[in-house]
Image (spheres, rainbow, N blue to C red):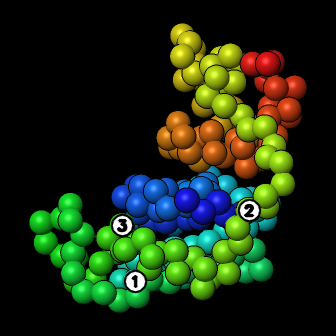
Amino acid sequence: MIKLRQAIVVEGKYDKNTLSQLVDAPIFETNGFGVMHDRALLDFLRRIAERRGLIILTDSDGAGFVIRNYLKGALPKDKVLHAYIPDISGKERRKAQAGKEGKIGVEGMRPDVLLAALQNAGAETAETAAPTAKITKTDLYCAGFSGGEHSAQKRKALQKDLQLPEHLGGNAFLDALNLLMTREEFLARYGGNDD
C-alpha cells in the first residue's frame, strides 16, 4: 500500500473501495453528479485541496469527464492534479452488462493501471517523518460524537459548525476531521480521550 500526501476524489463508493485497497489516502466521493448540487461537499473539497492537495480520478466515459470538468472549474487549479485511466472496453464484475459507453471505470481497473495513473498525475508519497497523532473513533466516542443517546445530533451540529457535507459516512467524517485539525486541536476543542 502506498501512502499519498494528497487526498483523492472519485465518483462513487465502488471506486473508493477499489482505490482504498491500493493507497493510504483520504478518498472522497462526488456521489456521481451529486457534487454539482451539493454546495457543502464542493466547499469541503475546496478546503481539502487548499490544505492538502487533491487528485481527481474519474471514469474515462462522458459522465466522468463532465464531473471532472465541473470540479476543474470549481477547485483551485494550482492545488488539483488530474489522474486519467485509459479507455478499456468491458464491464465491471459486479455489473450484469457494460455501461452505456462500454468502458471499464475506476472500480474495474487493474491495480497497476490505477497506480500508474496516480503516478503520472504527479501524486506525492507521504513523508516518512514521524506520523502525527490522528483523531480516532475512540476520541469521537469519548467526546460524545458516537455511541451515545444524542451522538447523532451532536455529530450533525459539529458537521454544520465545520461546514462539512451533511451525508459523510462515519469513516469519511473521521477522515475529514483529521484533514481539518490535529488530534490536539480536536481534544482541546471538544474533549474526548486524553491518553
Mark 2 or 1 closer to N-term? 1
Please, is residue 182 above or below residue 105 in the view? above
Q: Position of residue 92 (x, y in %)?
A: 24, 69
Q: Position of residue 69 (x, y in %)?
A: 54, 82
As drawn, which residue projects farthest toward the top? Answer: 149
User: Is residue 62 among what the camera can see?
Assistant: no
Q: CA distance from mark 3 to mark 2?
A: 24 Å
Rendering coords of residue 156 (x, y %) = 60, 31
Q: Going 71% across and 19% down the picture, which residue do you hit?
A: 143
Residue underneath mark 2: 126
At label 1, counting other C-alpha atoms closer than 10 Å, the crowd grade (few under 14, some 14-19, many 20 or more) is: some
Q: Quick one: label 2, few (<14), some, or many (20+) residues within 10 Å? A: some
Q: Earlier in the sequence, mark 3 or mark 1?
A: 1
Amino acid type at mark 3: Glu
Is the Cβ of the residue at disc 2 closer than 8 Å to that at disc 1?
no
Determine the CA span between mark 3 and mark 1.
12 Å
Disc 2 is placed on an element classified as: loop
- Of tags 3 and 1, the one toward the viewer is 3
**Of labels 2 and 1, the one closer to you:** 2
Residue that mark 3 sits on: 107
Q: Report which quarter residue 82 is drawn in.
A: bottom right
Crowding at label 3, few (<14), some or many (≥20) Cα neighbours within 10 Å? many
Residue 68 vs residue 77: left or right? Answer: left
Q: Which residue is mark 1?
A: 60
Label 3: element kind? helix
Closer to us: 55 or 129? 129
Task: Identify the residue at image location x=79%, y=19%.
Answer: 195
